[in-house]
Image (cartoon, grey):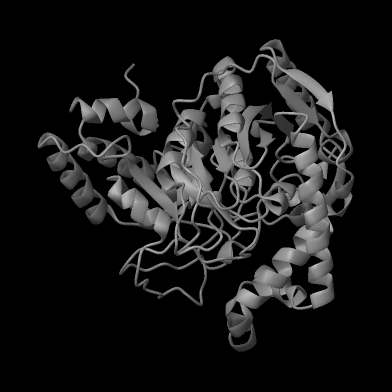
Amino acid sequence: MEQPLFQKTIAELAPLIKSKEISPVDITKSVLNQAKDYNAQINAFISIDEEKALKAAKQAEAEISQGIYKGTLHGIPLALKDILHFENERVTFGSKIHQSFISSEDATVVSKLKKAGITFTGKLNLHEYAYGPTNNNPHYGPCRNPWNIEKIPGGSSGGSAAVVAADLTIASLGTDTAGSVRIPASACGIVGLKPTHGRVSKYGCFLLSWSLDHIGPMTKTVEDTAVLLEYIAGYDEKDPTTIDKPVENYASSLTGDIKGKVIGIEEDYFFNTVDSNVKQLVEAAILQLESLGAKVELVKIPSLKYSEYTEYITFMAESATIHRNNFMNQLDQYGSDVQHLLKFSNIPSAVDYLQGQQVRTMMIKEFATVFSQVDVLISPTLPALPPTIGDEMVTIDGKEYPALASLIRLTSPGNLVGIPAVSIPCGFSDGLPVGLQIMGAAFQEKEVLNFAYAFEKSNPQFTRKPNLKELLTN
């Protein structure tokens, strides 16, 4: 049976578009129809703009027919998290306060994707202001996990993960402050990359924490993540945190050859208080990578024991600064969970914040030392399976733990030290996907993605899709 267009990847569609075997219009219609069929149940979109999408697709078709082919993304339909500015368009940031906000310019990543010929289909649901890992949005409704609509898709980029997993878009982008790309990627069984801090411009993205925030690809495959990264990466004079470093050819560097490479395992932190089924799947994945020629070495990163404190102090202090005016004047317009977090965010002192940054400096040095000995660090992405929507606890081997702290615990160190980290599917537990996190040294996205590619190619069974028809009729 011929695979529907909406199920295909960027890498599969691009050559067909270039050769004019398929039309960008047909792809866009296929994706839009899938969104019409299933978005009501998954609630991944805040808005769908069918008219605009079809107009852009027709323009791409006309350009390509005239011999104007802009590259791999030309004519590919994408939906994006509703936290990125689009010129002269409404951007809500998942909030009530900004529900009628009209942006005056494009975010840098949006501008780059427009130049590449992307067709935008709509804006995606997220945790309010990206301030949480569940995507339980009080203003636009909770986004649901397409593997089990009673479960969270993870957050804050839950809409982005859900639409990729359910084929309501070909690919997407997410933002990541403490794991908001990788958490939903793990929960929904897709690929999600948080690049090195400074690799991708954040200009035109509503910030949660300027020193922790990242923007990264969320896709169906590692190859698509590599392709998308090439288009969005690079120095931007509008974002002073970006680093002026050449963008590499990430996709062409994917060989899957990891012979002689060294995997670091930090057991004390990354494998502590992890559900036994999750741990078993991750350990099996590491054994498979060993069978491909990689070596395993146990490492120690003592400062990790302070990472939860440091992450909280950093994003609380910085988010309190960003939200200061609205907090003082429109507190009742926030959802109850974000209200609660913002109240606590105003408690840390300058001393607390600066002590946190001292710990952060120590962590950066210790991670750098480890990466002088190993090529990647591997861990679970999440220590537990996604909880039921509305639950404030997660279950790990029969014991309950606070959901917020648990969901970000294994991903937030990557934000603190600013290193690239990807989550890829490595199996299923109770019918839900489990993610494998692969971290690398700063600007070593090629290394991280090649490890992910090696595992993905050896385990095609983990890239299967949720049965939406069966799921939504139960």
Is residue 161 depicted above or below 134 in this figure? above
- Nearer to me, 209 or 172: 209
User: Total label count?
Assistant: 0
Q: Is residue 362 left or right of residue 437?
A: right
Residue drawn at the location 56% of the way across and 53% of the way down: 198
**Residue 217 visible within the image:** yes
Is residue 162 depicted above or below 271 in this figure? below
**Residue 349 visible within the image:** no
As drawn, the residue found furthest toward the bottom would be 329
Residue drawn at the location 74% of the way across and 27% of the way down: 282
Where is the N terminus found, in terms of image quarters?
Answer: top left
Residue drawn at the location 70% of the way across and 65% of the way down: 315
Residue 404 percent across, percent down from the top left: 74, 56
- Nearer to me, 321 or 384: 321
Where is the C terminus found, in terms of image quarters?
Answer: top right
Q: Residue 335 lies in what quarter of the image?
A: bottom right
- Nearer to me, 223 or 331: 223
Residue 50 percent across, percent down from the top left: 27, 52
Residue 93 percent across, percent down from the top left: 49, 66
Q: Residue 76 lies in what quarter of the image?
A: top left
